[in-house]
Structures are given as C-alpha cells and as structure tokens.
Image (tube, rainbow, N blue to C red):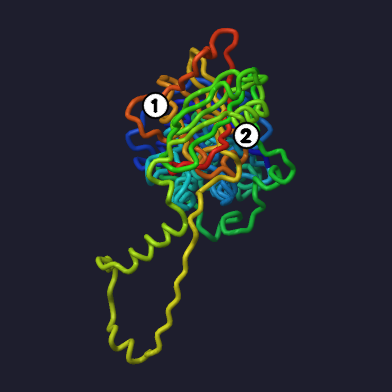
Amino acid sequence: MQIHSLDVLLTRRSFLSSASVAGSAFALGCTFEVASAQPAGASGTPLNAWVRIEPDNAVTLVVSQAEIGQGIATTLPAVIAEELGAEWGHVHLENSPADPAYRNPRINWQFTGNSESTTSFFDLMREMGAGAREMLISAASDRMKLPEASFRTDGSKVIHVASGRSIAFADLAAAAARKSPPRNPRLKSPAEWKLIGKSLKRTDTAAKISGRAVFGIDVKIPNMAYAAVRTCPVFDGKVASVDRSSVAGMPGVLAIVDIPNGIAIAAESWWQAKQAIDRLNIAWSYGNNLAIGSSSIQEQYQQALASDGWLTVHNTGDQSAFVRIYPTKLSAEYSSQFLAHATMEPMNCTASVTGDGCDIWAPTQGQEMTKWCCHRCLVLRKIKCASTGPSVAALSVGGSWPILPSKRPWSPRLSDGQSSCSGPAKKTCSTISTGPPSLTN
C-alpha cells in the first residue's frame, strides 16, 4: 500500500458531497477557496472528499491526520474501506491538503493531537465510506433494474446477492458520482465488519523500513538554497551581537538573516550553511532564565506540593472508616526530569515564495496552523501547504512553524551588504533548525 502527497484543494463537488453526508458537524463556519482541478496526475472519480475510484478499480482514500507513529494512517482508512466494501489490498492512500473539509469534526480545526483522531473521526469515516457505498449501489440498481436493497458491496464490487452477479466499482464510478450523496447512509453492524477490530499490517511501516518514506527533511526541489539556524540556548534569550565578519568569505554563503531569538545563514548547500552557522560568533543576552535547571524546577515542585490551596476535584466515601480498616500507610514519590518535547527528525521546512504565493513542504501536525503562521509571517494571500509523504510528521512531533509572539508580521532582515533573493538569483529556501526547541512546539 502506498501513500502519496495531495497538494491541491478540493473540488466543489467533493466538498459538498462530504458535507452532505456528514451533516452540520462536518465543517461549521468554514469558508475556503474552491479549486476546479483534480489533483495533479489523478485519473479517478471522486465520490466525496475522502473516496476516489480509479480506472483500474483501485480505491484511493484520503488521510487527513498526520501519521506520527500512532497508526492512524491504517486505522481511519480501514474504517472507510470497511463501510465502502473496498478490497483492502487494492487501497491507495493520499495525504490530504490543508483544507477546512478535513477538519477534526469535534474541534473544527485541521490538527493531529490529543490522542483523539480515532474517537473524533470514527463516525465521520464510517459515514464517508457508507455514503460512497450507497451511491455505487444506486448506480448498480439503475443499470441492472433491480432494487437497491438486493445489493451489497465486497472486494471493490457491487454484488447482487440472489444471483451473485457483480459490477466493479470502476465501472459504476462515473454514474455513482452523479448521484446525490445520502444524508443518513446505513452503517454496517459490527457483525458485518471484516477490517474494524482486526489486526492489520501498518500501511506506513514498509516504506519506513526500506527508506522509501519521504520525510520533510527529504524534500528536494530545483534551485534550492539551504538555511541553518542557531537560536538562543536559554528560553526567552536574545541575540546581543553578531560578528558577521567571522564568516566572511566562506564558500556558498548567500545571506545572514536575523530571526526571532536567533540567526539563520542561507547557503548553496546544507553543509556550507552548517559550517558557517557553527563558525559565526554570536553573543547572547540570556535574560532571567539562565539559572533555571532541573534542580531549581524540582525545588519549585516541592514547594508547590507543600503549600496549601489544593483543589479537591472529587471526594466520596468515609475516610475515617477506611483508615480504621487499613491502618498502614504506604506512600511513594515519583518525579520526571525536565525534558524538551523535541523531535527526532530535526525541525525543518521548505518554502518556495513566488509572485503567485508560497508553497510549503513541512512536517507538521497542524496544516491549518502552518498556513496561518505563513500568512502572518510572509504577508501573502495565497499559500499552499502540502504534507510530503506517508508519514511526513511521523518523527517530527510538534515540528510545525512556531507562533511568533509579535503583534506585527515578521519578515527576515538581511545583514548589511547582503541583497535579498530576487530576480534570476531567487532560490527556494529549506531551513533546518540546529538550536534547541522552543516552548511553542
């Protein structure tokens, strides 16, 4: 099973089909730009925002949640395939674009986290699969002139139960796509389930083991520049001064850029940028947090535990009677050291800024947050955000663009003597963080 990237917006019909099936909980208050084109290279027929039938009878299902090791790129597609009656071995997966149609129906926000993907999307995924199934059955009913109730789906076919005659999904897709999506499709009973509740092979494991998986840091596009970043090693610290002459004349260096709480160097290759940022002499203003460490944090915890004012969340039963029955007191104290909520994959992002807008390739759990931050940082009207592969965020938890504290848009400031990348010399920039993770991630 393969997972592909999908970097275009939905068609109007795809969105309306999904919204019709899912009802009012699907996309409350959503407004978005509607594209008229199908995904690049897509030849199949969409039945809703999540299901597309290919000419070879394969079924393409869209994965909206970031696969970060929790198996969601297996679980949610299997729920759709279950209700649809798709042949699981011939299902292909695509990552969704950043679009309100794929928002978590509970929080109305396209975000992966809080350990809630399955609980939030389970009903919606069933409805998407069931709605597409009923559209296909309706098309088969029209063709065979038989009641819809006499059909079922299995193995990516619509089957007439009494006679055993069947029609492949691909042969019915065009007619099914013209059907109005059912508002309340019949959901299968647990007794009918063949995939849900069963142990399935993970859809992302093979590509990771073989090295075929494309992570954010693997993205390569023509005419790229590379940026390496150093940020203050103390939270809330700032750059006091920079000796830019310390990297003068180093090969490949294109620009030295001031960024919030740090410095970035752009160069023609990653190694050139890394060598330059390591050599750059930076003096830091550490602020008030320099003395904070594991021991001081532990002391704060102990003081808080010893203080009064604790909130009683729940109180039931007779405590005095319990103590009489069980007079022996046992107590234990457990603590965990202060650790960075860091990513195994270095935080990274590739951005291509043109006169038409900005294309972003990034490992992120929040596609809409990424677009929002880019709008704010770059002051652009049009931004496309594409996840880059089968588990672009799998080893990059929290690696989305940071939310900047300033109230005005931030733009990179080049050092004296540097010109901005424009005209023929303009390059796409890929940034790789080499500093500590910030509290915003």
Residue 108 in sight here: yes
Q: Secondary structure at mark 1?
A: helix
Q: Residue 49, percent across and down?
A: 49, 34
Question: How far apart are the alpha carbons under marks 1 and 2?
Answer: 23 Å
Residue type at mark 2: give it.
Answer: Ile
- Furthest residue to the left? 309
Tell me which residue sits at (29%, 67%) in the image. Answer: 307
Residue nearest the viewer, comparing 429 with 325: 429
Residue behind mark 1: 376
Counting residues from the start of the chain, the first of labels 1 and 2 encountered is: 2
Q: Determine the image quadrant of residue 90.
A: top right
Q: How dense is the environment of label 2, judged by Cα within 10 Å: few (below 14), some, or many (20 and up)? A: many
Residue behind mark 2: 217
Q: Secondary structure at mark 2?
A: helix
Tell me which residue sits at (58%, 20%) in the image. Answer: 428
Q: Quadrant of the N terminus?
A: top right
